Image (cartoon, rainbow, N blue to C red):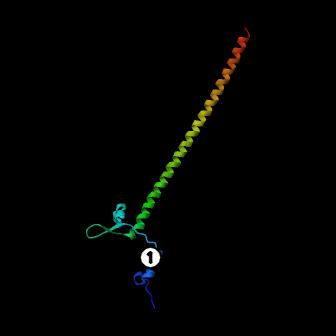
Amino acid sequence: MKRSWRSNRLPSATRRRLTRQITQFGLVAEEAEKANPDLVVRDKEGKPYSVRYDQVNAMLLNEFLKEHRKVEELKKDFQTTVAQQQKGMEILTAQLKEQAAQIQKANAKLDVNKSARQVVLNNP
């Protein structure tokens, strides 16, 4: 004996129980049309009637791949920017060290000149 499990052939109590347990998802044709008009089947008057669910997965995959490419490009740009900033920091650090060395030399000369002046002033 073969049983058909179509919901319209089940007793109403069983039908209610089944519909409570099953979560169904769907798209509103008018909303899907805004995202991509090719996903919508139109009625005789040209109004959105239904969603072409067989095309949704392909469209979503294409959009995912586009966004993934954008993310990869942004990663490369970010890595390039970081590398440039690191190089700039290295240059600035080297310049700062050079300036610190020059300041130390100038201070040393000032100390020598100051001590020489003190010697001259102390020996009149």
Secondary structure of residue under mark 1: helix
Q: What amino acid is at disc 1?
A: Thr
Residue at 44% x, 81% y is 13
Residue lying furthest left in this view?
45
Residue neighbourhood size for the residue with mark 1, other residues' Cα within 10 Å, grouped as few (<14), some (14–19), many (≥20): few
Residue at 37% x, 64% y is 32
Q: Nearer the viewer, residue 5 or 39?
A: 5
Residue at 47% x, 58% y is 68
Would residue 37 be found to the left or right of residue 98 on screen? Answer: left
Task: Determine which quarter of the picture holds residue 57.
Answer: bottom left
Residue pointed to by mark 1: 19
Would residue 71 be found to the left or right of residue 30 on screen? Answer: right
Would residue 30 be found to the left or right of residue 109 on screen? Answer: left
The percent coordinates of residue 58 (x first, y second) are 41, 66
As drawn, 100 above or below 73: above
Residue lying furthest right in this view?
123
Would residue 27 be found to the left or right of residue 72 on screen? Answer: left
